[in-house]
Image (cartoon, rainbow, N blue to C red):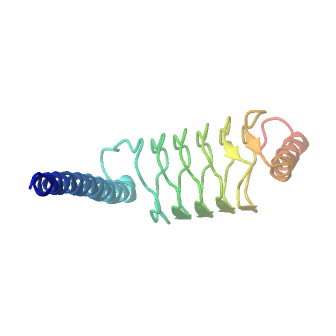
Amino acid sequence: MSNELLLLVLGWLLGMVSSFLTGLAMFWLEGKRQSRDEATKQRREDTRTARNWAAEGKKASLREFDLQGASLSGKDLAGADLEGADLEGARMWATNLSGANLIKANFRRVTAVGANLSGAKLHYADFSGATLVEVDFSAAKLHRAKLHRVRKAERCIWRGVEIDETTELSPDLRKEIENQCFRQRATDQELGPGVG
């Protein structure tokens, strides 16, 4: 009889532990789902705000915005404060980001075609896996930026871009930038002072 009672108590305890662990797992999964839903809702709100940024009367800061996978094609974000923004996988066809603060921005896997990044502050920006076609980087500041793992960089404009030894570039891209800057200096010297 005592063995049956012991088995009964043991079964009851195992049932309680099992119920507790199941409840704990369900609570954890529900928390993860709510966090994911909140992140998705925030990303949608951030994308809506960024898309309407140029139309807003008072310009909101877009710092730390989550714009992963957003379509920013044709949007005017000139002068926007996007420091630390997450633009991973965003599509930027003819997007105007001239003069924007893009320090520490995440441009991983971005597709940018005809985008304007002239005069932008791109310190610490990461372009790993990005596709850059006909992007205007004129006079952009690229100190400590990561461009050495760019997927593709074709027909980009690099005139007057600021790079140094801290800028991570592939040898081919560094050569292209230096050639464009050299050609620009030579053209400026041919035209003489005060011209151009």
Task: Judge left or right: residue 64 versus residue 150.
Answer: left
Which of the 4 quarters of the picture holds residue 4?
A: bottom left
The C terminus lies in quadrant: top right
For image coordinates 29% across by 52% down, the residue present is: 35
Q: Depth check: 187 or 63 in front?
A: 63
Which of the 4 quarters of the picture holds residue 150?
A: bottom right
Q: Depth check: 34 or 126 in front?
A: 34
Task: Judge left or right: residue 92 versus residue 34.
Answer: right
**Residue 154 image point, x, y percent:** 75, 63
For image coordinates 68% across by 42% down, the residue present is: 139
Task: Judge left or right: residue 127 versus residue 41.
Answer: right
**Residue 66 image point, x, y percent:** 41, 51
For image coordinates 72% across by 62% down, the residue present is: 152
Q: Depth check: 171 or 53 in front?
A: 171
For image coordinates 66% across by 62% down, the residue present is: 131
**Residue 97 image point, x, y percent:** 53, 51
Which of the 4 quarters of the picture holds residue 120?
A: top right
Q: How many marks?
A: 0
